[in-house]
Amino acid sequence: MNRTKILVTGGAGYIGSHAVVELYEAGYQPIIVDNFVNSQESALNGIRTILGTDIPCYKIDCANEAAVRGVLEQEKDIKGIIHFAAYKAVGESVAEPLKYYQNNLGSLLVLLALMPEFGIQSIVFSSSCTVYGVPDQLPVTEQTPTKPATSPYGNTKKICEDILNDVTAAGKGQLRTILLRYFNPIGAHASGLIGELPLGVPNNLIPFVTQTAAGIREKLTIFGDTYDTPDGTNIRDYIHVVDLAKAHVVAVERLLAGGHADVEVFNVGTGRGNSVLEVVNAFEKATGQKLNYVIGPPRAGDVPAIYADVTKATQELGFQTTTSLEDSLASAWKWQQTL
Ligand code: UDP
């Protein structure tokens, strides 16, 4: 089988590893680059076991132009890039903004600088619903105005979108770009062989929930229950990570088929909003585990409610999610039990 090569930066990370599996299963040859700062080499073992084959992986920093050039020279005929590699901790980005700007902007700039030289015309970029800030209207469509970022992390996503818009426009059709604005990815591969590997105390809700159920954390603190939402807790759009990974496959297919002259933006969520309390209840129902939780104060910078309108991805990419919230949470629990 002659597989089209796709460079996957951050391919050993949480979303990246699931995308590598989906790409390979769809007939592509993923080539991973990852610096393993926020990922572990065990993800490669999981990928290998799922696929029954090794996926090439280069342990390099994507912001290092010489190192990325070396990979592109070695692999020669890469046709597209999915750019996941980025730092992603909101709180840390406030404490160490320079690290975030250097890495998240630097790696994109390196890729964009090298793409023409190696004849690579297609890029899918991992953006985030954080670009919508506190939206004036729900659900958010791709036309919903973006808002100034509330953290350096969020700002790197916004600036990377701006860079891609400018460079794509100047490229006169030589660069084809899809921005995927992720909502909240959760869960793990059905095999239980790859999943999220948070370092230290998790910032995100679901790993905190599963670690609490596993007895690693004493209790979950729900960050506020007096928001202007039906039960007072925050609302998010939780998408199963394999559904999200599949969006990258259809995005790559669209770009390689000729894509679109302008940057295309797609929300990737389920279109469903669930409150933190609903997540807790769904977790208990799906797993039979009782979750110890308390209500705490709101977390600074949290958006009260956001969820996606996914009409555009459905109509134009043929994208559809298939995993319910409960099944997503059950997969997260299955994964937790392997750790
Ligand atoms: N959350 C919570 N307790 C936690 C972690 C998160 O109540 O220990 C809430 C948080 O306030 C937000 C939702 O869970 O409403 C999702 O948070 P997460 O950090 O996973 O994603 P975010 O939407 O902030 O990117």
Image (cartoon, rainbow, N blue to C red):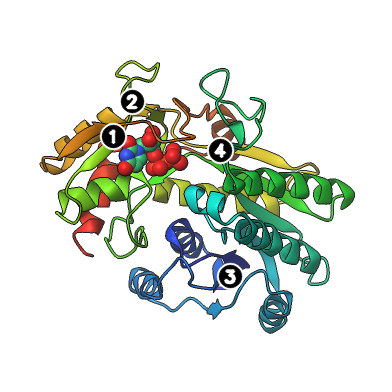
Q: Quadrant of the N terminus?
A: bottom right
Q: Is residue 103 above or below residue 93?
A: below
- Residue 238 visible in the current orientation: yes
Residue drawn at x 34%, y 68% is 50
Mark found first going from the N terminus, 1 or 2 = 1
* Quadrant where ligand 1 appears: top left
Mark found first going from the N terminus, 3 or 4 = 3
Task: Give the amino acid type for the residue marked by disc 4 in the picture.
Answer: Thr
Q: Is mark 2 within 8 Å of ligand 1?
A: yes
Q: Nearer the viewer, mark 1 or mark 4?
A: 1
| Residue identifier under label 1 | 222
- Do tag 1 and tag 2 residues touch (Cβ < 8 Å)? yes
Mark found first going from the N terminus, 1 or 4 = 4
Task: Give the amino acid type for the residue marked by disc 3 in the picture.
Answer: Arg
Residue drawn at x 30%, y 65% is 193
Residue nearest the viewer, comparing 286 with 159: 159
| Residue identifier under label 2 | 233
| Residue identifier under label 4 | 130
Tell me how far mark 1 sits from mark 2, CA to CA. Answer: 8 Å
Residue drawn at x 20%, y 52% is 217
Q: Is residue 290 above or below residue 54?
A: above
- Do tag 2 and tag 4 residues touch (Cβ < 8 Å)? no
Q: Residues within 10 Å of mark 2 (few under 14, many from 20)?
A: many
